[in-house]
Image (cartoon, helix red, strand yellow):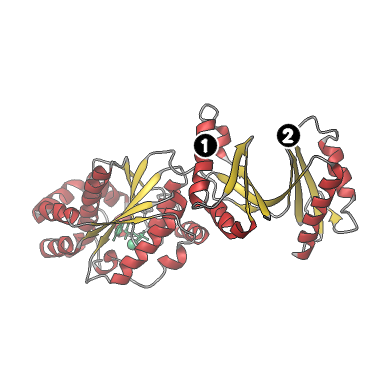
Amino acid sequence: MDTVYYLGKIGELSLKKGNKKFFENRLSENLRILLDGKKAKIRVCAGRLTLEAGVQDREACEWALSHLLGITAWAEMSVCEKNLQAIIEKAQEKAREGALSGAKTFKIEVRRGDKTFPLNSFELARRVGEEIHDSILQTDVHKPDIVINIEVREKVFVYGIQHTGVCGLPAGVSGHGLLLLSGGIDSPVAGFKMLSRGMKVDCVYFHSYPYTSEEAQTKVEQLAQKLAAFGLGAYLNIVPFTKVQQQIKATTDEQYLTLMMRMCMMKIASIVGKHIGADCLITGESLGQVASQTIENLNVTERATDMLVLRPLIGMDKREITDCAIKIGTYDTSILPYADCCVLFSPKHPSLHTDDSKATALYQAMAIEPLLQEAFDNREVKKFVALM
Ligand code: ATP
Ligand code: MG
């Protein structure tokens, strides 16, 4: 059977001294889940993850590595014995691959994990470099088009082109959050931000059928599926929100509609969050982005729950958020045209600076708590697994 080999560079968890073994085990278990039953050898050792699988599973391996939280970079590599001639041949192959993809210059970088190897790093780089310089590529140690890496470990790993990893901490090492997931650009990014700190993330979506379409819900399901790939699975709680919105509309002045709706969302999310044992709520709010996200209005929604509320995007601007959405692959889904409920119920002149006592009085006047409980009771739960 033909084999493919990959190397992953472990990021921050190599700093976690006491827990290192726990984090490393988690990383390899997570990769195994992403590989979804494919036969593979996974090892984590000395800041490196290695993966060996059948060549027919190349695509699955690359998908898994590009979704594995906890690695900063990954590359397909060649593996050979600790023998100079074998190393030169593998490095030449990588140089030729580089030349084919347009590289003109190269440099060699050596990591000599095995200090018994007879050549030191400098000598090894020089000897291998001589066999590539002029005949395949030109040396440029300052700004090379391609770096050919040689790592001398239990065997020798040789790799060229590297892909950026998703970084962060391995999924499932930092508690459990409930993400308020809408179909917009922001909330999936907020979910990803917490996933990438190792948090397990489940989702809640407030659906206002028929004011919002079935497509709006499908879009949120697709976003939950994307997040589930990084988080190794997620539950989406779909809460029927129409009656709550109608009651808000019937009992509240136009300018406070959005804020009351945000309070109701936080209240229902808290019921869901406690029910599933979450440690916190997560939202995609960013300071000053829309009327409900002024500091005063954030104070109001904060007080609508006694759970910790994490707002990982609070200091990010839309451009940064959008760049992240593109990077994690949620952007194209988020910009599909189906409106979520906020858009349909947004007043022309929303109150920007509502004080807390005013908000509490308005909230109580709606007498809406039974409807919130009913919405929770009628929720539908869908399960998403990490799938290529
Ligand atoms: P997004 O792009 O995430 O939709 P937004 O800029 O449209 O955010 P708002 O509509 O004010 O902002 O929503 C703020 C946050 O409230 C969202 O990031 C999300 O966490 C939550 N939220 C809004 N609408 C919904 C919904 N229908 N279901 C679940 N959560 C929602
Ligand atoms: Mg929105």
Q: Does residue 189 show up?
A: no
Q: Closest to the observer: 337 or 54?
A: 54
Q: Is residue 292 left or right of residue 264?
A: right
Task: Please report the residue visible at 60 percent of the width from the left and 40 percent of the height from the top.
Answer: 43
Task: Please report the residue visible at 77 percent of the width from the left and 55 percent of the height from the top.
Answer: 94
Q: Quadrant of residue 56?
A: bottom right
Quarter of the picture holding the N terminus: bottom right
Q: Is residue 33 left or right of residue 59?
A: left
Q: Quadrant of residue 10?
A: top right
Q: Look at mark 2 in the image and give the residue it sits on.
A: 113
Image mark count: 2
Q: Look at mark 1 in the image and give the residue it sits on.
A: 25
Q: Secondary structure at mark 1?
A: helix
Q: Does residue 269 show up?
A: yes
**Ligand 2 falls in which quarter?**
bottom left
Distance between the alpha carbons at the discs numbered 2 and 1: 21 Å
Kind of residue at badge 2: Gly
